[in-house]
Amino acid sequence: MFRSAIFGACAVALTGCAPLAVLEKAQNTDLPETSCFTRPSGGCVFDQNPLLVEPTPVTIQRRPYKFFPVAKTLNFVDYQGRKWVAPRGTLTDGASIPEIFTAIVGKPTSPEYVNAAAVHDAYCGIGNEAGTRWHDGRWEDVHRMFYDGLIVGGTPELRAKLMYAAVWLGGPRWETTLHLDRVETGDLQTAMRATKAYIEREKPTLPELDRYLKQWETHLLPVSPIAESPMAEVEEEPMEYPEEPYETDYPNDPVSPVEIDSPTDTGNAVDTTILTVPAAGSESACAVSACL
């Protein structure tokens, strides 16, 4: 849980709080961003679109969405020319956003997300632990690749940064002692809602957003090793907190134009006949927007 002193630091509503001084400084310095958003010609390409998946879903216990195996290996090249791969058979649910954040971020199942989600899942998604790409890279780089993939897929910049923040705060980490999965769900949701407001208000570059997220990390973890904290040299100030408890539904949050059919979905199913794409040979597959 947060320290009681921190909760008392800002007793007014979130939008009325003065921004953290160090984050104001980061914003004012206009830290440059180097990514597929700023350098789209530096690689930034998927080798297939739309993503092809097998038509038969795989059910994973206690997961809200259906998972589909990738029918054909998907390759992605980021702005640095680094190649990322989702091998054939990679399980993907087309989302990658931690379930605890879907009420804040929105249901992330739109066609512009699926390629990025599939490659991200190959490196850290549930069901792919035995895959050849599992944890093949630093967790920070894998989540950064997810942001670049979203941009290439057509996700608007601020939406992509919101989804990047969600996997940074609530997604898997490895080869580190700074694990946010030890933090209580309510506290992580507090950080995510505040981060959403920060992104919408400040429109930060990616380095500025990273600084903001790392500052949250130092507050969320009960004990944060000084040697491992990139923000250890920065004098801490009280973070921003809303006055009222968060609701479980946010009607004004962005809603994706096409939703994946899931066990929790209601209403009419999407007509998929015009989206079906046959795979090579005798195998059958479909475009991910049709299958999911």
Image: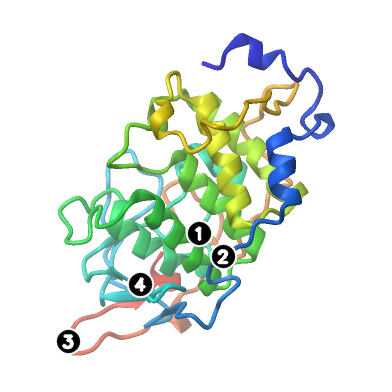
SS under mark 4:
loop
For the residues marked 4 and 2, what is the alpha-carbon distance in whole angstroms? 30 Å
Residue 274, position in %: x, y? 47, 83
Give the residue drawn at x 18%, y 90%. Answer: 281
Let me know if residue 261 appears in the view.
no
Look at the numbered discs 3 and 2 and tell me whether their residues touch, using CB distance below 8 Å: no
Decide which of tag 3 and tag 1 comes sooner along the chain: 1
Residue type at mark 2? Val
* Residue drawn at 46 percent across, 47 percent down: 167
Q: Report the disc number at residue 109.
A: 1
Q: Are marks 2 and 1 in contact (CB under 8 Å)?
A: yes
Residue indicated by mark 2: 258
Q: Secondary structure at mark 2?
A: loop
- Tag 1: Cα neighbours inside 10 Å, few (<14), some, or many (≥20)? many
Q: For marks 1 and 4, give the CA distance.
A: 26 Å
The residue lying at 61 percent from left, 48 percent from top is: 209
Check whether the beta carbons of the residues at disc 1 and disc 4 lie within 8 A of each other. no
Query: Label 4, label 3: how many angstroms apart (C-alpha)?
Result: 33 Å
Residue 221 to residue 61: above or below? above
Q: Are marks 4 and 3 in contact (CB under 8 Å)?
A: no
Residue denoted by label 3: 282
For label 3, the SS is loop
132 relative position to 138: left or right: left
Residue beneath disc 4: 82
Determine the image quadrant of residue 90: bottom left
Of tags 4 and 2, the one toward the viewer is 4
Towards the viewer: 252 or 59: 252
Dot 4 or dot 3: first in sequence order is 4
> The residue tagged with tag 1: helix, strand or loop?
loop
| Residue at the image point whose x is 55% and y is 61% from the top | 268
